[in-house]
Image (tube, rainbow, N blue to C red):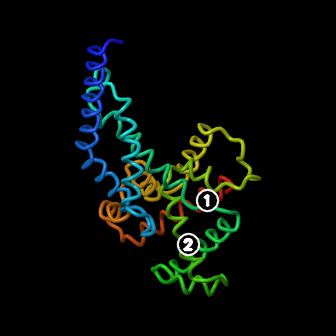
């Protein structure tokens, strides 16, 4: 390759890289807004900047593969992939052991009983005393549970399922169909909470405003539904 041709190629590559970097910078506000919305549905232990970092890594990679001749909207091309990278980050946090799953189940069952009696959530201290573990263990388990509940329902199965469970070998499409069939057996309000949380991606406060019920009630319905779904699916 002659020197003139090499200079032209280098200039083109520098110009292309600059254009790709400008795309990332231009859509950072959209990425940060996505991370903030996701963070509003997560426990305090998940850092906003970690979500942004996961999204930025994905967006930089996507900017390198983006072809504006095929798709004239970069954010339309990248948005779901960036969101997927943030979910991948959540999946990587603290894989659950069988003991974790058992503790989470105990916490959920006791919380449901307490709420039915007192119309409020029990404290970590109360749960720790009832179960016989430390408050730190209760807090950690609740954080893991809240993170897992954010994931799509079929992925909760992948994360939490007992390897010896009934549905170990079920195909993903069959699992989703089975979940939808189970949901049809619940009340309209119960179905609405699941629809708004997992499909419309509203947070608990937004669902509370929309349905005209307290946020604690929305939280309880959500937990109740997840417990019932997990029981029916064998995890």
Tell me the quarter of the image containing the C terminus: bottom right
* Other-residue count near label 1 (Cα within 10 Å), few / some / many at <14 / 14–19 / ≥20: few
Residue 227, percent from left and from top: 59, 62
Residue indicated by mark 1:
95
C-alpha distance separating marks 1 and 2: 12 Å
Residue indicated by mark 2:
140
Q: Residue 80: give its label.
A: none
- Using residue 39 as the reference point, say whether residue 128 is left or right of it: right
Tell me the quarter of the image containing the N terminus: top left
Count of picture labels: 2
- Considering only vertical position in the picture, is 9 above or below 128? above
- Considering only vertical position in the picture, is 225 above or below 24? below
Q: Between residues 143 and 211, which one lies in front from this camera angle? A: 143
Q: What residue is drawn where x is 54% and y is 71%?
A: 142
Q: What residue is drawn where x is 27% and y is 47%?
A: 28
* Other-residue count near label 2 (Cα within 10 Å), few / some / many at <14 / 14–19 / ≥20: some
- Using residue 158 as the reference point, say whether residue 208 is left or right of it: left
Q: Between residues 113 and 173, which one lies in front from this camera angle? A: 173
- Quadrant in the rendering for residue 207: bottom left
- Mark 2 secondary-structure assignment: helix
Residue found farthest to the top: 2
Residue 179, percent from left and from top: 57, 47
Q: What residue is drawn where x is 44% and y is 64%?
A: 46
- Quadrant in the rendering for residue 206: bottom left
Residue 97, percent from left and from top: 68, 63
Q: Earlier in the sequence, mark 1 or mark 2?
A: 1
Residue 205, percent from left and from top: 33, 65
Q: Between residues 78 and 221, which one lies in front from this camera angle? A: 78
Q: What residue is drawn where x is 71% and y is 56%?
A: 162
* Circles 1 and 2 in contact, beta carbons < 8 Å: no
Residue found farthest to the front: 3
- Considering only vertical position in the picture, is 87 above or below 123? above
């Amino acid at each position: 390759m002659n020197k003139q041709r090499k200079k032209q190629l280098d200039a083109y590559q520098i110009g292309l890289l600059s254009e790709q970097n400008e795309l990332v910078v231009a859509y950072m506000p959209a990425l940060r807004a996505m991370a903030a919305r996701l963070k509003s549905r997560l426990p305090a232990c998940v850092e906003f900047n970690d979500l942004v970092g996961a999204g930025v890594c994905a967006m930089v990679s996507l900017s390198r593969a983006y072809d504006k001749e095929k798709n004239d909207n970069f954010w339309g091309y990248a948005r779901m992939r960036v969101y997927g990278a943030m979910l991948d980050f959540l999946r990587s946090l603290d894989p659950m052991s069988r003991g974790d799953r058992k503790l989470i189940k105990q916490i959920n069952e006791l919380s449901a009983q307490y709420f039915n009696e007192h119309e409020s959530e029990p404290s970590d201290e109360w749960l720790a005393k009832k179960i016989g573990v430390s408050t730190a263990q209760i807090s950690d388990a609740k954080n893991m549970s809240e993170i897992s509940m954010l994931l799509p329902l079929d992925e909760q199965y992948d994360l939490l399922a007992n390897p010896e469970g009934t549905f170990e070998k079920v195909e993903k499409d069959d699992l989703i169909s089975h979940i939808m069939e189970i949901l049809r057996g619940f009340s309209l309000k119960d179905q609405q909470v699941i629809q708004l949380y997992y499909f419309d991606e509203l947070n608990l406060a937004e669902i509370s405003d929309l349905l005209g019920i307290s946020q604690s009630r929305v939280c309880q319905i959500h937990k109740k539904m997840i417990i019932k779904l997990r029981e029916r699916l064998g995890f």
